[in-house]
Image (cartoon, rainbow, N blue to C red):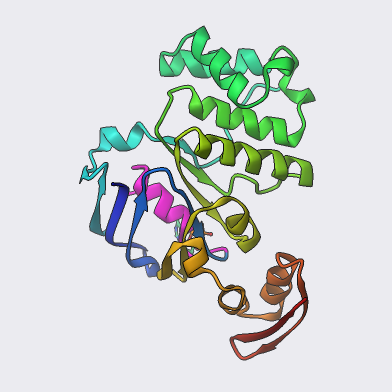
Amino acid sequence: MSILSLQNISKKYGAVQALSGVSFDVPKGAVYGILGPNGSGKTTLLGIVTDVLKADTGSFTLFDQPATARQRRQMGTLLETPNFYHYLSGYRNLEIAAAIKQRGHDDIARVLQICGLTARQHAAFKTYSLGMKQRLAIASVLLGDPDVLVLDEPTNGLDPSGIAEVRELVRQLAGAGKTIILASHLLDEVEKVCTHVAILRRGQLLKSGSVEAVISRHDFLELAATDNTALQTALAAYPGCTSAQLNGNVVVAVFN
Ligand code: ADP
């Protein structure tokens, strides 16, 4: 069963073609990575799927049915960091979010538990680590108990321990049966947490399918390295890469 099936999605902003003819299927239970460098169309794609943006052309189905706006709004989405109150506790912040979503105290206790925040629930948000703040953001998305979670760059801006905590939470949620769609510009992240991937370059779908079938490190270096700064960024994502040379748009990389 496909949780989400995209057919030929295109979107322009004025003269900028942000997405052109993108199609792929997200199977139930997948952790589906949307991978590509900055500006490749990841956020636009997530915006369309969650009904924040409208595609110019194309269509998609949710749970094998034409997607209604209502269904899309019922997906758990984290496209940007929520505005939490710094002086209130994690618990109080979730109470506010729960009131908006018409959820009760049982739901708050459930999501705090899932996100490993029960012990610190009464501490002020401002005392939380970066990883805890992001886990609280995910907890707030989980209040509605969605089957599908859509996360835009969930580890962006976090420190190494925060990154590890959030990745572990994503794996745990997938283990509990959620289907997760997440955008990332890091191959490393997709390899560590995703089962499937769609690689975008300048709004076009390069490849999609299971991570093992789709990803070769060479491809992604090629994709990322349009200039030397991009090459350095790409190399930073490859701990095993000992050297690389940019030759036109192609990278010759050596891995140990
Ligand atoms: P990503 O999430 O991969 O960084 P985006 O979906 O944000 O990519 O952007 C895709 C392209 O669309 C980029 O060229 C970006 O500059 C452009 N773009 C995104 N949002 C807007 C907007 N609101 N107005 C004009 N251009 C935009």
Q: In this view, does 74 lie above or below 79?
A: above
- What's drawn in magenta, residue-wise? 38-54
Q: Quadrant of residue 187?
A: bottom right
Q: Quadrant of the C terminus?
A: bottom right
Residue 198: x and y, percent? Answer: 45, 62
Residue 56: x and y, percent? Answer: 26, 59
Q: In which quarter of the image is residue 191?
A: bottom right
What residue lies at 58% left-to-right and 79% top-to-bottom? Answer: 222
Q: Quadrant of residue 165?
A: top right
What residue lies at 66% left-to-right and 18% top-to-bottom? Answer: 90
Q: In the depicted view, which residue is nearer to us: 173 or 65?
A: 173
Count the numbered circles shown: 0
Residue 18: x and y, percent? Answer: 41, 64
The answer to whether residue 107 is left or right of residue 133 is: left
The residue positioned farthest toward the bottom in the image shown = 247
The residue positioned farthest toward the top in the image shown = 105
Residue 152: x and y, percent? Answer: 53, 47
Q: In the depicted view, which residue is nearer to us: 99 or 17?
A: 99
The answer to whether residue 4 is left or right of residue 140 is: left
* Residue 40 shown in magenta: yes
What residue lies at 23% left-to-right and 38% top-to-bottom? Answer: 68
What residue lies at 74% left-to-right and 73% top-to-bottom? Answer: 232
Q: In this view, does 188 lie above or below 62?
A: below
Q: Can residue 207 be seen in this view?
A: yes
Q: In the depicted view, which residue is nearer to us: 165 or 72?
A: 165
The residue positioned farthest toward the left in the image shown = 66
* Residue 202 shown in magenta: no
Q: Is residue 83 visible?
A: no
Q: Is residue 145 above or below residue 25?
A: above
The answer to whether residue 46 is left or right of residue 67 is: right
